Image (cartoon, helix red, strand yellow):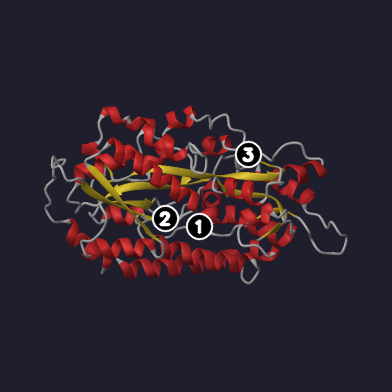
Amino acid sequence: MVAIALCAIGCQNLSLPSASTATTPVVIKLSGWGSDPTEQKLLKQVLKDFETQHPGIRVKYEVISDQYMDVIKTRLIGEAAPDVFYLDALEAPFLMSQNVLEPLDAYINSEFDLPDFEETLINSFKYDNHIYGLPKDYSTLTLFYNKQAFATAGLTSPPTTWDELLTYSKQLTVDKNQDGRIDQYGYGVIPELARQAYKIKAFGGQLVDENGYAAFASEAGLQGLQLVVDQYQKDRTSAQKSDVGTNSGSEMFGQSKVAMVIEGNWAIPYLKETFPQLDFATAEVPTINDKKGTMVFTVAYVMNKQSQHKAEAWELISYLTGKEGMEKWTATGFALPTRQSVAQKLGYEQDPVRSAFLAGVEYAMPWQAGKHPAAIMNNFDNQFVSALLGQQPLKQAMQRAQAEANKLIRAME
């Protein structure tokens, strides 16, 4: 029903208004989700700078704290959506297919320098040869490792292959108090699909097929997932956050419950603030099946097709994703710039902690799972944890997850 309603409003023939010449400033509504207070403060400053440079435009910024996408979809149906809003790459395929977003191609000129964006990120917001969003920032996944734990184990460099990671994990798994309990595991595993998809791809598997149905239970896809299950069950050198009484991969690494974990750029400020004594480093995700792989997560600014102030909305989007605005937004390091020139100017390619994140974006797998990601993601997560805990064989678990996901997808089409 949501899809039908969105399609109905998207098919209306709306004219493109020109920039206002009135003396009263045009108000543009921008919506995003809740985030770190420091991030909110920085965004408000960037928006203030935009208003200073564009005195004819005022930005009304709204934080949607709960059920963000449900709120956005409801407002799109009710013709009350904001002019500009955040759109996660995971949710983009569905909204782009509903004809409710304004294509940005006609607004982009050579001065905007579209080739400056990382191609992988731009492609996440392309549909039917149109660009519907401009990515504001991103993060890949990289390997975080505890330098002190490595030194104690006699390890001098991070693992470069998954076989090395498994070997290192054995050396790093220790019972510090000799009481029969593991005090430090070699590796912290996060079983969610968002952290496992690149392993499925490493052996030629895929998340969804060309028709948008779940396809992760193929023999090729199972090979990558089996690596995770075997390490957890047989080697016993990895732990989940619940095994060690923590709430996230970053926390179990920060508390030294695990010596290695694969996390995103968001972990850096958290670790530095919460665990200032922790001596850690990062490296690219170890290769699997002789192939480089990681995930990339990104969010774009998109324009509501029903906006009554499209010219002004574009001015806002182009500033926030332009070189000046993006530099201000990403200068503190909590987010990575999607423009290559900004990353170079800020020195992130030489940053010993962040350079691995930038290196991974060229070969990263975008975090997308078709038009109905929730059906795929939720069923995978539930069944994969069951397999990880040994409650059922991996193949059986994944076939069940795939079948149930596709049943739901068929019901939604």
Residue furthest right in the image: 178
Disc assigned to residue 259: none
Q: Which residue, given by chain and number where applicable, does mark 2 sit on?
A: 369
Pick the front one: 395 or 177 = 177
| Element carrying mark 3 | strand
Q: Which residue, given by chain and number where applicable, does mark 1 sit on?
A: 218
The residue shown at (46%, 44%) is 138
Disc 1 to disc 2: CB gap under 8 Å: no
Label 1, label 2: how far apart the Cα atoms are: 16 Å
Q: Position of residue 120 (x, y in %)?
A: 42, 39
Q: Is residue 7 left or right of residue 231?
A: left
Instruction: Report the amino acid beneath label 3.
Output: Ala
Q: Which marked residue is nearer to the observer: mark 2 or mark 3?
A: 3
Q: Would residue 153 be visible to someone looking at this image?
A: no
Instruction: Report the amino acid beneath label 2.
Output: Ala
Circle nearer the N terminus (2, 3): 3
Q: How many marks?
A: 3
Pick the front one: 53 or 312 = 53
Label 3, label 1: how far apart the Cα atoms are: 30 Å
Disc assigned to residue 283: 3
Q: Position of residue 38 (x, y in %)?
A: 49, 49
The residue shown at (52%, 40%) is 333
Instruction: Report the amino acid beneath label 1.
Output: Ser
Disc 3 to disc 1: CB gap under 8 Å: no
Circle nearer the N terminus (1, 2): 1
